[in-house]
Image (spheres, grey):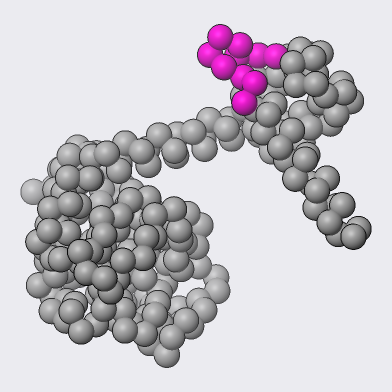
Amino acid sequence: MRADVALSATVQSADRALAILAAFSSARADLGVSELAAELGMHKSTVSRLLAVLQARGLVRRDGDRFSPGPELARLGMIAVRSLALAQVAREPLERLAERTGETINLAVRRGTQALNVDQVQSAHFVGMTDWTGRGAPLHATANGKALLAFGEGGLPEALEPLTPRTIADPALLEQELDEVRRRGYAIAVEELELGLHAVAAPVFDSAGNCVAAVSVSGPSYRLADLEATGAVCAATAAEISACLGFRRAA
């Protein structure tokens, strides 16, 4: 009972903090405690306490008795904008890749130790129709993740959990694998996330040469057997998306 009460209070506090953030707009870029309390129907002491927490997290900044959106909120907003723009640019090439391979196509970005799937074009087959959009998977156990590790920034995750007998859970062996990914130009995952699942993935670069995403083709092992040919097609699609983002490979 006490746990339920504590959880309810935590959820209520989170909801109120989000309501404070949502109160800001381009027309009202800075607000005071009294304004927020009156508008949101909260006590001033509650608003002050929540603003202090948000300020500590960088989600709001204070100038005298006025508050405005903080740098951390700006950072998160930029991530969201980039992800949306990336998905829009990539959509048509991803659809063509799905049509050519007949398999599930995912576009993923790095989020900590996960490869977060931001867009997907599903296979026409009944087997392999799971929607991974908005879901993450461990970097070290996925083709998308290995492409992001090989060509992106951030280093290896500290913990490399073996999800199947074929998952590479040794840092030295994973570094060797990433060297091979760089040499080959695309990553391969053979039953490393789930038994019976194969995938290939290639990096996507922005105009500054930063690896901002990875494109993968995945499917059951009995269908996705020619990984070299599929990897080359996947890499070509990733290169097309990179070009749309302004990337030009050095001569």
Secondary structure of the magenta portion, mostly? loop
Q: Which residues are magenta?
A: 22-33
Q: Position of residue 142 (x, y in %)?
A: 36, 71
- Left or right: 126 with respect to 3? left
Front one among 21 and 176: 21
- Left or right: 171 with respect to 101? right
Q: Position of residue 30 (x, y in %)?
A: 65, 14
Q: Residue at x 75, y 45 (%)?
A: 11
- Left or right: 44 with respect to 118? right
Front one among 178 and 189: 189
- Left or right: 75 with respect to 226? right
Q: Is residue 209 magenta?
A: no
Q: Position of residue 58 (x, y in %)?
A: 66, 34
Q: Is residue 249 visible?
A: no
Q: Quadrant of residue 185?
A: bottom left
Q: Position of residue 138 (x, y in %)?
A: 46, 68
Q: Quadrant of residue 126?
A: bottom left
- 21 in relation to 204, above or below: above
The furthest residue to the top? 27
Q: Quadrant of residue 193?
A: bottom left
The furthest residue to the bottom? 165
- 74 in relation to 172, above or below: above
